[in-house]
Amino acid sequence: MNSSVVTVTLNPALDKTVTIHGMQIGGLNRVQQMRLDPGGKGINVAKVLNQFGVDVIATGLVAGSQGRFLLKQLEEQQIQTGFLEINGETRTNLKIYDEDSKITTEINEPGFSVNHEDLQIYRQKLLELLHHTSVLVVGGSLPPGVPEDIYREYIQMANGLGVKTILDADGVPFQEGIEGKPYAIKPNRFELEQWVGHELKTESEVVSAGKQLLKTGVSLVLVSMGSEGSIVMDQHETFRVYSFPITPKSTVGAGDSMVAALVYSLLNGKTLKDTAVWATTAGTVTASKSGTQVCTLPEVQQCVSRVHASIL
């Protein structure tokens, strides 16, 4: 299979989003609405890129009846897939959205267990796909049994084939992944604080931490900061991006939408400033939607003029 982009989701999920009014901790909560979506960082990125008309293959690991249901849903959305089916059961992640407080509470399962043989088979599958692609997106949590340096391995594999890689992870997989020298990374503020080992209280401290990442060999850093917008930088420029006000309905998939817009911008040769604006617009539009619904290309095109970037 050939594609412009390959995304990796080693720990996918069925995202079950329920809407309630006034969450009662320890009490009875009645669900007003419910939706079930295929989820996981790479899958969400693939959903957005598919909406943007980009040729993308979503890959990774799935298991059990829930895994087959997830694949069926992706097929119905006309997203190409290249998943390896293993033993076990794909997890369900519960998202509880309280209409009254406008707060989303997430309850995520750990996922299936993966053995060494599964990883070897999938590695060969991924290697074959990388011979026919331009960009690899890796990220998200790792299921039990997967070594925490797996993203570094995939990034180095892609680098050896001239494929640009984008990393979106946290904790040790993020730290290890950086050692592989991905082309771009998208930490949020908390993930960046984890990496530097201390709180980033000011904008200038966020910029300084981002520049430390650039010194590791990363070419582009996109720091997402929720309603505060983002900071985007490369070796030559740094932009502070301000978004437009929304009523956030779910932040699930917002960061993944930013990654997808970053990929779209790379494929279309956009400047760093335009990339920063597009990524921030995509994240904002997705955050304004309920559940794990993602932005579409017309929505981003309509809103992109409302996002402003200034050089730092």
Image: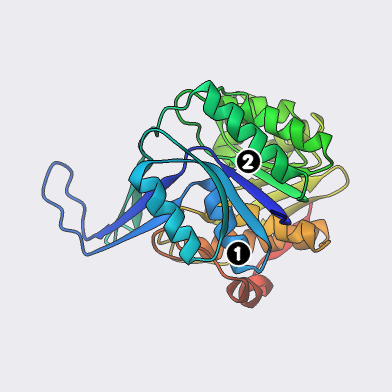
The quarter of the picture where residue 173 lies is top right
Horizontal and vertical percent for residue 251?
Answer: 46, 54
Q: Residue at x 73, y 25 (%)?
A: 179
Residue 213 horizontal side relative to residue 68, left or right: right
Q: Which mark is residue 138?
A: 2
Q: Residue at x 68, y 36 (%)?
A: 205
Secondary structure found at label 2: strand
Q: Count neighbours of disc 1 (C-alpha within 10 A) and say few if under 14, some if 14 to 19, many if 20 or more.
A: many
Q: Nearer the viewer, residue 26 or 167?
A: 167
Task: Answer whether residue 187 is visible to the viewer in this image.
Answer: no
Horizontal and vertical percent for residue 56?
Answer: 65, 57
The quarter of the picture where residue 106 lies is top left
Picture layout, residue 90 above or below residue 114: below
Name of the residue lying farthest toward the right: 236
Please state which amino acid type lies under the numbered disc 1: Asn
Residue 100 horizontal side relative to residue 212, left or right: left
Q: Residue at x 64, y 39 (%)?
A: 125
Horizontal and vertical percent for residue 217?
Answer: 82, 32
Residue 200 horizontal side relative to residue 93, left or right: right
Give me the C-alpha separation between circle 2 and circle 1. Answer: 17 Å
Secondary structure found at label 1: helix
Please state which amino acid type lies under the numbered disc 2: Val
Q: Nearer the viewer, residue 74 or 155?
A: 74
Please give the residue where the numbered disc 1 appears in the rendered image: 50
Q: Nearer the viewer, residue 193 or 32?
A: 32
Horizontal and vertical percent for residue 79?
Answer: 56, 61
